[in-house]
Image: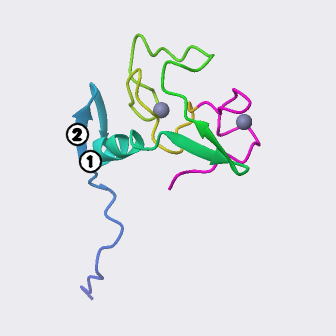
Amino acid sequence: MSVRGGREGTDAVSKEFVIYNGRRVVKGWPEMIQAAQLELTVEIGGVTYQRIRYGDEPDDWGADRQPCHDCAAIKGQFYVGGCDVECCPVCGGQVISCSCGFDEPD
Ligand SMILES: [Zn+2]
Ligand SMILES: [Zn+2]
């Protein structure tokens, strides 16, 4: 009667957070940001381009006021791969929505 199955699906996914650049980010994220700073270029269609730093893109994403809303990079830093603000150096659009073949360094 009182059979207790193993309780799976702990609803409290205990993610650990840390504060970085004044933002709450998942643990390990600051290391991701640091690693992103080492990727100065990106290869698109066989051509190497300089990556665009937060604050250097044509659109104003608030770099002067706050860290990137997506990846928590601050002005002058490179975005973490996959950030939805990252600007494509080819077309000037957002990497996530352009079709230039932006390749994650990862
Ligand atoms: Zn970002
Ligand atoms: Zn593009």
48 or 92: nearer the eye? 48
Residue depicted at 49% across the width and 18% down the height: 55
Residue 27 shows which numbered tag? 1
Residue depicted at 38% across the width and 31% down the height: 72
**Residue 36 location in percent, x, y?**
41, 42
**Residue 77 location in percent, x, y?**
40, 29
Q: Is mark 2 within 8 Å of ligand 1?
A: no
Where ligand 2 lies, by image quadrant?
top right
Residue 18 shows which numbered tag? 2
> If the image is split into quadrants, where does the N terminus sit?
bottom left
Give the magenta range: 87-106
Q: Are marks 1 and 2 in contact (CB under 8 Å)?
A: yes
**Residue 57 location in percent, x, y?**
58, 20
Amino acid on which the number 1 mark rests in the picture: Lys
Amino acid on which the number 2 mark rests in the picture: Val
**Residue 104 location in percent, x, y?**
57, 50
Q: CA distance from mark 1 to mark 2?
A: 6 Å
Q: Residue furthest top?
A: 64
Question: Residue 82's image quarter?
Answer: top right
